[in-house]
Amino acid sequence: MQQFIYTVKDENGLHARPAGLLTQCAKACSSDIRILKGEKSADAKRLFSVMALGVAVQDEITFQIEGPDEEADCAKLKAFCEENL
Amino acid sequence: MLHLFNKQILIGSPVNGKVVDLNEVNDPVFSGRTLGDGCAVIPQGNRICSPCNGKIVQIIDTNHAFCILSDDGLEILVHIGLDTVKLKGTGFKRLKEEGMPVKMGEPVMEVDLSYLREQKKEIITPIVITNMEKVSSLKIAKGTTDSSGIIMKVKLK
């Protein structure tokens, strides 16, 4: 399993637009991807699940990526976060 | 009982107004179907209602959007206006809270459309099914609608 922590910089947090772009990026990955925020956990491929985390600016979220392509998928998600969140 | 399969699900308008294609929404996240497929309503009323029977699973902190899980398992996002996250809640008033069951046509949010216009925000309100993997077909009823008038007919896989 690959894992990384990201601190959200978008001042509006993970609202519909960034959450939608994130799920789109996650859906393009073959790995299973979980996003953790505190006690809560979400399926990164499901918009409702991601939005329900209620991620705000400066929140730390943890990505857990598991599957045969986890290294490539992890790199893809990291790059996405840096660019969009 | 063949008709039990591929049951047709009716989605009601959250508000009276004009129903248009998602392509007409001036935001690629909606028109490009990034969030899912559906349609949009240009509202004429100020009470935004649930488009189906179900449960309010989330109201975004800034009150500009809410998520309904329908009794049939559809996840429907109602996003009031475009770029309205930036209003930080001003112009919106909750009429319901997260976790509450709702019926189609039951008001969830009150919106001050003239405030949105003053703030140069488009009032067009996309209604998007975010779990399209459950949907086999989607028909949109364009044109003028009443609140809870049927705007989409959905068949499940």
Image (cartoon, grey):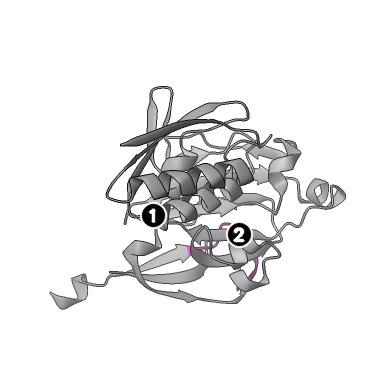
Write the residue at 42% across / 58% down.
A28
Q: How many angstroms separate mark 2 from mark 1 (CA)?
A: 19 Å
Q: Along the line of sight, which residue is nearer the eye, A73 or A16? A: A73
Disc 2 vs disc 1: which is toward the camera? 1
For numbered disc 2, what is the local secondary structure? helix
For image coordinates 20% across by 70% down, the residue present is: B4
Q: Which residues are magenta?
A: B12-19
Please say whether residue B102 is visible from this viewpoint. no
**Residue B123 in sight in this render:** yes
Q: Quadrant of the N terminus of chain A?
A: top left
Q: Is residue A36 left or right of residue A13?
A: left
Residue B69 in the figure: left or right of residue A57: left
- Residue in front for this viewpoint, B68 or B111: B68
Q: Is residue B95 left or right of residue B87?
A: left
- According to the image, label 1 marks what residue? A29
Residue at 34% over, 46% down = A70
Q: Which mark is residue A18?
A: none
Q: How far from the left and from the top, in percent, is residue A14? A: 57, 39
* Residue at numbered disc 2: B29
In the rendered structure, does residue B77 fall within the stretch colored magenta? Answer: no
Q: Nearer the viewer, residue B146 or A32?
A: A32
Q: Chain of mark 2?
A: B
Q: Is residue A74 above or below residue B88?
A: below
Residue type highlighted by circle 2? Val
Kind of residue at badge 1: Cys
Q: Quadrant of residue B3?
A: bottom left
Local packing at callout 2 (Cα closer than 10 Å; few below 14, some 14-19, many 20+) is: some
Q: Is residue B136 above or below residue B101?
A: below
Q: Quadrant of the C terminus of chain A?
A: top right
Residue A75: horizontal and vertical position, in percent?
Answer: 46, 45
> Furthest residue to the left?
B1
Residue furthest right as drawn? B118
